[in-house]
Amino acid sequence: MIIDFRSDTVTKPTKGMLDAMMRAKVGDDVFGEDPSINELESLAASMFSMEEAVFCPSGTMTNQIAIKCHTQPGDEVICDETAHVYQYEGGGIAFNSGASVKLIHGDRGRISAAQVALAINNTEDAHKALTSLVCLENTSNRGGGSCYNFEEIKKIKEVCRTNKLAFHLDGARLFNALVAKKETAEQYGQVFDSISICLSKSLGCPVGSLLLGKKDLIKKARRIRKAFGGGMRQGGFLAAAGIYALKNHITRQAEDHAHARLIAEALTKKDFVEAVLPVETNIIIFSIRQPHTAKSIVQKMKENNIIGYAITPVSVRLVTHLDIRPEMVQRTIETIKHL
Ligand SMILES: *Cc1c(COP(=O)(O)O)cnc(C)c1O
């Protein structure tokens, strides 16, 4: 039994999901004729009370399309220094949008309204790039699955409104935050101009993300998706997995969160662990005490068929997900005890 905690992207479709995929009605989505994609897009839009949604192959693509929609070349984007849009999208902000980035040193990936206000360039100063977009990430991946306080998000929204900035959410793991904080998709739909959600992470789909926003924005997004090469044809087989996940895999994430807390508790007791970031959702990040290294600990775990991910030379990430069953968590805890 291999227990793979590298990411929540490693899940395989469940029987129910595969059945839904096999039954999918499909058509050519570039002609707008795939009934399953159309259904997925309207289901997601209605969950968030947003006007429209567009289905894309990846979360990187939905984020990059959003950034392209909200900026002009030479503009500046504000985000946390650990943000996925900046760190893990292949330099896409510069490559696709020709925009620069103002990085904020946040609290475990979360930035504050006061920090955003300070990071906005003076529009009267011709030396400065025009700030046009603020991107948040909830939950924050590098923050160890940390969740925003929604009150702070509303304050950041106010700063954006006052300064005429667009407001985008990288919600690759937003559903984890909704479950953990007992929040609703609608409240997020009310404050953001665009939201990107991943179906391929905790929701357990093989592929897929959605970008949500107003009608005009999504119309523009569809053109950019085509230019980026993301127009899919009979993608309804994948959309059917997404519909199934939105209907069946959201509330169960509480189980992943409980699993993560149990594993974190076991880690806290170990000498080789310097510190474990507080577990809020399905991500555990812990730092390693010398003479051990992240590599040596990951190797030791691997010898016991437990796969983690050394995210820096001194820290390891474990992510719980749909394919981690309770007996695997027990095995992991036993292994950690003897490590
Ligand atoms: C995984 C992830 C994405 C999107 O990644 P893809 O692999 O392109 O789907 C975006 N943001 C965050 C925070 C992520 O963890």
Image (cartoon, rainbow, N blue to C red):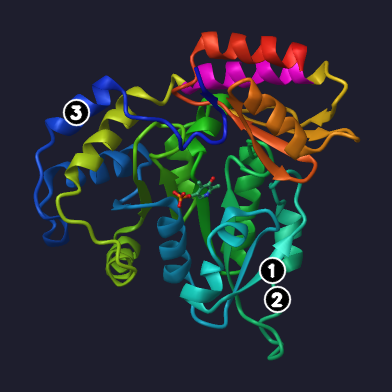
Label 3, secondary structure: give it: helix
The main secondary structure of the magenta stretch is helix
Q: Which mark is residue 20?
A: 3
- Tell me which corner region of the image, top left, top right, bottom left or bottom right, holds residue 149: top right
Please state, as top left, top right, bottom left or bottom right, where the C terminus lies in the image: top right
Q: Measuring from the top left, give residue 323's x and y in whole percent.
A: 44, 22
Q: Does 162 sit left or right of 198 as displayed?
A: right
Which of these two is toward me, 301 or 182? 301
Real-space CA distance between mark 2 and mark 3, rounded to the nearest whole angstrom: 49 Å
Q: Measuring from the top left, give residue 36's x and y in whole percent.
A: 16, 41
Query: Is 44 covered by the magenta stretch?
Result: no
Label 1 vs 3, first from the N-terminus: 3
Q: Is residue 104 above or below residue 172?
A: below
Ligand 1 under 8 Å from disc 2 Cβ: no
Q: Measuring from the top left, give residue 116's x and y in whole percent.
A: 70, 60
Over which residues does the magenta segment extend? 253-267
**Label 1 belongs to which residue?**
102
Q: Is residue 285 visible?
A: no
**Label 2 belongs to which residue?**
121
Q: Are marks 1 and 3 in contact (CB under 8 Å)?
A: no
Which of these two is toward me, 238 or 225? 238
Q: Does 55 sit left or right of 317 as displayed?
A: left
**Label 2 vs label 3, nearer the camera:** 3
How many C-alpha atoms fall within 10 Å of the one at disc 1: few (<14), some, or many (≥20)? some
Q: Does 268 sit left or right of 215 as displayed?
A: right
Which of these two is toward me, 163 or 269? 269
Real-space CA distance between mark 1 and mark 3, rounded to the nearest whole angstrom: 43 Å
**Label 1 vs label 3, nearer the camera:** 3
Q: Measuring from the top left, give residue 23's x and y in whole percent.
A: 11, 30
Q: Are marks 2 and 1 in contact (CB under 8 Å)?
A: yes
